[in-house]
């Protein structure tokens, strides 16, 4: 919101929230009805193309968002190093409003202007008129309109909203108050209306012009330089005709320079070109890919999780992952993405963060959770993990942490497989088990004397049982085979506190649960039971009268930068213990692996996490279902 919002700041459908898209339904239905109900000679096929065109515009914008986030995470050609945070994502989440506005105006124009009906597919004269009017009229008026918007009166009421984003993303280009968008639309409508009124308009010229504006807007705000230097060398006048991302980036950092729409020509004429434009371009175009200090290796979970990735839908990524029923409408894209992951055999960079002097990156294996349980997929998954470790080694990373199922015992023995293959590895492989155990231990309510341990056996489960028994807390199990395995795993001395719970299972109010907790076992818990997961995946919340804690995680310190997405189902600025463990190993300079059967000191890593600003998730994050 602008610092002093003026009239027509709010979009007309803003109060509708996620239902705002219903505004488009009457227009779309009417366009279909006009085709079905009218005779052949009365039908206007131009109008039926508006909705598909709007959808392609949204796809175009989304592709720019994904590309920009991928490129800026890797670092190559990045322009501005400052952070993007959740407040910017929230502020820019309504980027599709301008697509809706253009659609409504196009529908109204197609219905009321007789010359706009049944446009031909192509006319050369209209195409040329559109280009000439843009270069001469639109660019000139926009330049002076833009300068006017930087006057303190209009800036404080309208344009400051756009400039709230110093570090731009492609879609920052269309984040303006409603009144400002109206002004832009009428400006860009000059070539379109002119060709309509002169009967030179065509479907192609309309689509080309709007797509051109979208393309150039996204390009100028993408925060990485992508226009190659050889273009300017081959044709030097090009620098006056087309702007670059670095050229417009200076407008967002300096504010009073580089006002041009897409053609720097007017900034040169009127003396408002930033003198550092060429220098910033040279610096950005030569900037190499960033080498991380810490890599966290994760993977896709469900097919729909592609939309939750930071490279997916920014609004989804900024909230904890939950399944949304309307995503089934995206099934063609979802199916296509699944097929791509089966073909694509390399990790990809998802996110970058900075903590103190450490450069952090998150890489993802293009595999879904279900594929980790397929025996014939395990070799290819292990090869991808191995390649990621070796790539991190080549890039000089200090630590690589294994997230989600990348450390499964049945897959690679908690990462031990790679250490045995490459005993001279400099990058330290961390499975994070010690911090996960520490977080669970400190999540158990004070005064607890007994807990029920339930779930598939794992390194974390055995370590938890051992730590609890040493503290004098009784650890109960439901089944005799689990009871025997635990006693054997933790040793005779500590095993005296391992008990078999049958008749008194309802008396135990704290359950430590891993993968494999079924509904029948779930229903054995008494009212008010607290479920604390020790696995990386949330248990299903089927009891409305019980409490559920998050998976092992901690709130990140305030100086962790560039946080604009949630890690899977965790709340904002909360990070899994397995991921934090890798960061702590790098911060503390612990030059050891933590994988296989090796466990790091639980107390030592817990104290280190608190010392570096990580702290436990507040009890309020454990919710009771209504």
Image: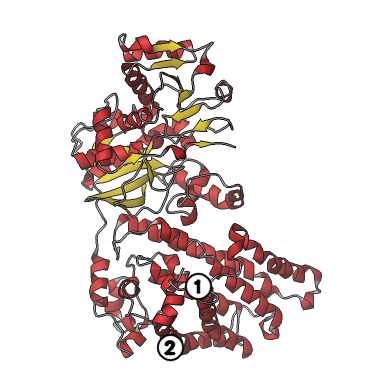
Q: The C terminus is located in which quarter?
A: top right
Mark 1 or 2: the one toward you: 1
Residue matched to label 1: 177
Please, is residue 596 above or below residue 392 in the view?
A: above
**Regarding mark 2 in the picture, which secondary structure is present there?**
helix
Mark 1–mark 2 contact, CB under 8 Å? no
Q: How crowded is mark 2: few (under 14 residues within 10 Å), some or many (20 or more)?
A: some
Question: Is 237 in front, or is 535?
Answer: 535
Q: Where is residue 93 in the image (x, y as percent from the top left)?
A: 49, 61
Which residue lies at the image location 53% right of the left edge and 27% below the top edge? 528
Looking at the picture, how far across and down is residue 341, in whole percent?
45, 45
Residue that numbered label 2 is attached to? 140
Secondary structure type for disc 1: loop
Q: Specify the label residue 267 is tagged with.
A: none
Which residue is located at x 52 percent, y 81 percent?
183
Q: Earlier in the sequence, mark 1 or mark 2?
A: 2
Graded by Cα atoms within 10 Å as few (under 14), some (14 to 19) or many (20 or more), the crowding at tag 1 reads many
Q: Kindly report the distance in space between the C-alpha atoms of the residues bearing marks 1 and 2.
A: 22 Å
> 341 or 285: which is nearer to us?
285
Residue under the point 63% across and 73% down: 104
Residue 158 appearing in the image: no
Q: What is the quadrant of residue 609 in the picture?
A: top left
Up-down: is 528 above or below 255? above
Residue closest to the eye, 360 or 526: 526
Query: Residue 562: x, y in percent?
Result: 34, 55
Q: Looking at the rendering, which quadrant does residue 536 occupy? A: top left
Judged left or right of residue 44, residue 63 is: left
| Residue 514 % position (x, y) | 45, 27
Residue found farthest to the front: 447
Left or right, 290 with reference to 521: left
């Amino acid at each position: 919101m602008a610092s002093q919002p003026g009239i027509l700041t709010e979009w007309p459908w803003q109060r509708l929230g996620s239902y705002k898209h219903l505004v488009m339904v009457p227009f779309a239905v009417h366009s279909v009805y006009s085709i079905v109900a009218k005779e052949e000679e009365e039908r206007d096929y131009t109008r039926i193309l508006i909705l598909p065109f709007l959808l392609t515009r949204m796809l175009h914008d989304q592709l720019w968002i994904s590309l920009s986030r991928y490129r800026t995470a890797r670092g190559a050609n990045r322009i501005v190093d400052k952070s993007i945070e959740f407040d910017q994502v929230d502020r820019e989440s309504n980027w599709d409003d301008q697509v809706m506005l253009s659609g409504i105006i196009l529908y109204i124009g197609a219905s009321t202007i007789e010359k706009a009906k049944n446009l031909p597919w192509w006319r050369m004269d209209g195409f040329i008129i559109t280009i000439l009017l843009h270069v001469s009229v639109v660019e000139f008026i926009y330049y002076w309109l833009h300068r006017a918007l930087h006057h303190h009166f209009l800036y404080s009421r309208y344009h400051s909203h756009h400039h709230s984003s110093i570090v731009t993303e492609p879609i920052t280009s269309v984040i303006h108050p409603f009144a400002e968008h109206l002004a832009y639309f009428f400006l860009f409508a000059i070539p379109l209306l002119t060709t309509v009124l002169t009967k030179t308009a065509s479907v192609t010229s309309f689509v080309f012009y709007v797509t051109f504006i979208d393309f150039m807007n996204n390009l100028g705000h993408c925060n990485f330089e992508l226009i190659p230097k050889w273009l300017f060398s081959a044709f030097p006048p090009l620098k006056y005709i087309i702007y670059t991302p670095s050229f417009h980036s200076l407008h967002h950092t300096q504010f009073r320079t580089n006002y041009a729409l897409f053609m720097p020509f007017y900034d040169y004429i009127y003396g408002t070109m930033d003198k550092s434009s060429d220098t910033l371009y040279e610096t950005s175009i030569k900037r190499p890919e960033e080498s991380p200090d810490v890599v966290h290796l994760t993977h896709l979970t469900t097919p729909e999780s592609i939309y939750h990735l930071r490279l997916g839908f920014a609004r989804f990524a900024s909230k904890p992952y939950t399944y949304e029923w309307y995503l089934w409408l995206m099934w063609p894209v979802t199916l296509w993405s699944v097929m791509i992951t089966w073909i694509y055999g390399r990790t990809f960079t998802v996110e970058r963060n900075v903590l103190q002097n450490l450069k952090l990156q998150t890489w993802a294996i293009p595999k879904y959770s279900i594929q980790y349980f397929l025996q014939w997929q395990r070799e290819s998954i292990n090869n991808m993990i191995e390649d990621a470790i070796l790539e991190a080694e080549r890039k000089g990373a200090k630590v690589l942490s294994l997230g989600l199922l990348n450390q499964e015992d049945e897959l690679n023995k908690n990462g031990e497989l790679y250490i045995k293959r490459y005993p001279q590895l400099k990058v330290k492989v961390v499975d994070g088990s010690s911090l996960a155990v520490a977080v669970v231990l400190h999540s158990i309510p004070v005064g607890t004397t007994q807990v029920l341990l339930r779930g598939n056996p794992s390194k974390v489960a055995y370590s938890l049982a051992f730590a609890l028994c040493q503290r004098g807390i009784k650890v109960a199990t439901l089944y005799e085979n689990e009871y025997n395995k635990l006693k054997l795993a933790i040793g005779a001395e500590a095993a005296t506190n391992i008990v078999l719970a049958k008749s008194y299972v309802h008396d135990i109010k704290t359950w430590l649960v891993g993968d494999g907790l079924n509904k029948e076992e779930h229903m054995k818990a008494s009212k008010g039971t607290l479920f604390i997961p020790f696995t990386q995946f949330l248990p299903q919340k089927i009891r409305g009268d019980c409490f559920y804690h998050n998976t092992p995680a901690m709130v990140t310190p305030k100086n962790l930068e560039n946080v604009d997405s949630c890690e899977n189902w965790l709340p904002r600025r909360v990070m899994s213990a397995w991921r934090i463990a890798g960061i702590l190993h790098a911060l503390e300079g612990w030059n050891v692996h933590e994988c296989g059967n090796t466990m790091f000191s639980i107390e030592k890593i817990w104290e280190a996490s608190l010392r570096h600003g990580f702290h436990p998730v507040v009890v309020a994050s454990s919710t009771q279902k209504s």
